Amino acid sequence: MDLYIKLLIGISIPFAFLTLFTVFRLLKTRRNLQKVSRVTIPPETSHDIVLKTCQEYAVSLDMEDSLSRLLEYLKGSVSVSAISFLIPTSEGSSDYIFKSHLLYEVAEAFVNSDLSALREYAEKNLGASVQNIDRRVDGGPLNSSSTVKALSRVIFPIEAGDFKGAISLSSRRSGHFSGLLEKDLQSLFSLCSTYFTLLSDVAQKEHRKFKSMVDSMRDGVFMVDEEYRFLIVNPAIKEMLGLHEAETVNIVRVSSFFSTRFSVEDVISEVFALGKIKIVDNILLNDQYYHLSAIPVKVRDSITGVVCLVHNDTPEKELEKMKRDFSAMIIHELRSPLSVIRGTSDFLLKEEKNLDIAQKESFLAQIKDSSDRLLKLVNDLLDSAKIESGNIELFKSEVDLNKLTSEVVDYYAKSAEQKKIALSVDLAKDMPTLQADADKLRQVLNNLISNGLKYTDEGGEVRVSTKKEDSSLRLLVADTGKGIEDVNKELIFQKYKQMEYAKTTEKRTGLGLAISKGIVDAHNGKIWVENNAPKGSVFIVELPL
Ligand code: ADP
């Protein structure tokens, strides 16, 4: 029996030891495993945090917002007492933002120790000069009776190009950040900094492109935030407001510019309130018409600003007026020769028996003259429509410009004589022929010579000449008439454009020069007007050889 008990004890004691030892080993391994997972950040979590933070930065380009998000993500993955950052309010500024997110109740002193550690780090390692600090604390409440101290702390730089700040994580446990965790955090923040820098580079490039686009716009552009701070201002708006380049645009200046017509502040606040585009049209100020569009700028469904585009509508309004005048004039131009044709033919039919041959001939000549006028008008309208639609067709052949010029001048000899205007021609020698549409060039000459005669008073002169240049031929029609002011020298080649004095002249449509320009352009040539000395103008047509 004794032997039996001894044997049992002899076997069970080592067995019990072995079991206890195994259980102990198992528990230790488990505890170690738990410890490791608490002090490391798994790569996929780290990757996720960097991705989400950079996404935030890509949308807002706001370091404070992005780091605040980063704190949120981090607190779920690392066990610390506080996570804080210190960043400048803008690149190179000495005003700083300090934000601390507390995960446990700590005393003010704990937060202060984080702040001074970050400040020291920024000044020593980032070359920062920290002057004013805007301090924000959130998360676990501050508890003045707490004696918790930061026994371990790690600080990492956080950068976006030249924008430099620092982030700290502190723990009430000593040696908390040794080893793996510090390494993980280090690579997480350095990855964030790399991506922030890349994103801010892209943003800066885009900003430069955007700025040069806005600066080159002829419309005035400005953007304000909710507090009417001007975030974007282009040179055109300064010019509209009559400001120098160095002067700043502010809400007072903009509203006083429009104040006699409407309140810009009201328009902007309406756009902020309703989130819809608002347009103010027909703003007449100092003889100029303006059009203002106020457009909401939305970032993630909230309106962060309002962009205002100010367009000077005056040229468009003038064109509209010109078109209206033109329609009225065309109606008149169609109606008057038609009335002559109708009245004269009625009279001829009724009174035919009582009229002699000479009288009949005179009435028929009136009918012919009026139908010529109508035909000319209709042809001009057709030509200008063709030119406008780019459908002008050239039938080119070998053209002798001198011959063509003398023919057209001869044609006008009689009417020049009637108007007592000296019409002369001066043809260059050794003029080569050129490939051109003779009928269309005749049309140009007709227009220039008839204009010369039309806008020159009795006793004046119209001189037509040709000239050979190195690789082109020139045609010049000079008169001693009214002349054309510099501001109108290009405008008269636009459709419908007539000077005030010409509006009273019968049979003018304002199409002749536009058609002439269309024809010359189709020949790859140039047409322009210069002053004639001592008075009048010279129209010059240059055709390439
Ligand atoms: P219009 O049928 O009105 O003459 P044009 O296109 O030929 O149309 O000319 C446009 C305008 O240019 C004219 O209305 C006139 O004001 C101005 N103009 C053209 N030729 C002359 C000229 N030789 N001298 C002064 N003004 C001219």
Image (spheres, rainbow, N blue to C red):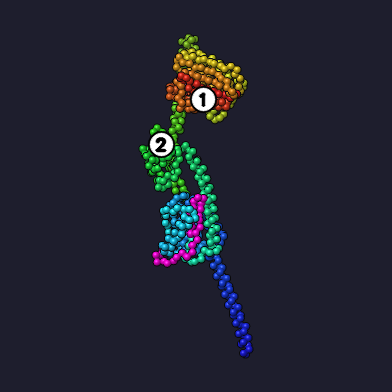
Quick one: 149 or 389, which is closer to the camera?
149
x 51%, y 43%: residue: 208
Corner quadrant of residue 2 = bottom right
Q: Which residues are magenta?
A: 141-168
Amino acid of disc 1: Trp
Q: Nearer the viewer, mark 1 or mark 2?
A: 2
Instruction: Answer with mark 1 or mark 2, whichever residue precedes in sequence.
Output: 2
Location of the C terminus (image quadrant): top right
Work out which residue is located at the far bottom of the displayed protein and give it: 1
Work out which residue is located at the far front of the displayed protein and give it: 124
x 54%, y 16%: residue: 426
Location of the N terminus (image quadrant): bottom right
Residue at the disc numbered 1: 528
Quick one: 264 or 136, which is closer to the camera?
136
Q: Is residue 213 magenta?
A: no
Q: Residues within 10 Å of mark 1 (few under 14, many from 20)?
A: some
Q: Position of residue 103 (x, y in %)?
A: 46, 63
Q: Position of residue 273 (x, y in %)?
A: 41, 47
Q: Position of residue 269 (x, y in %)?
A: 40, 46
Q: Is residue 374 above or below residue 286?
A: above
Q: Is residue 162 magenta?
A: yes
Residue at the disc numbered 2: 242
Work out which residue is located at the far left of the displayed protein and give it: 260
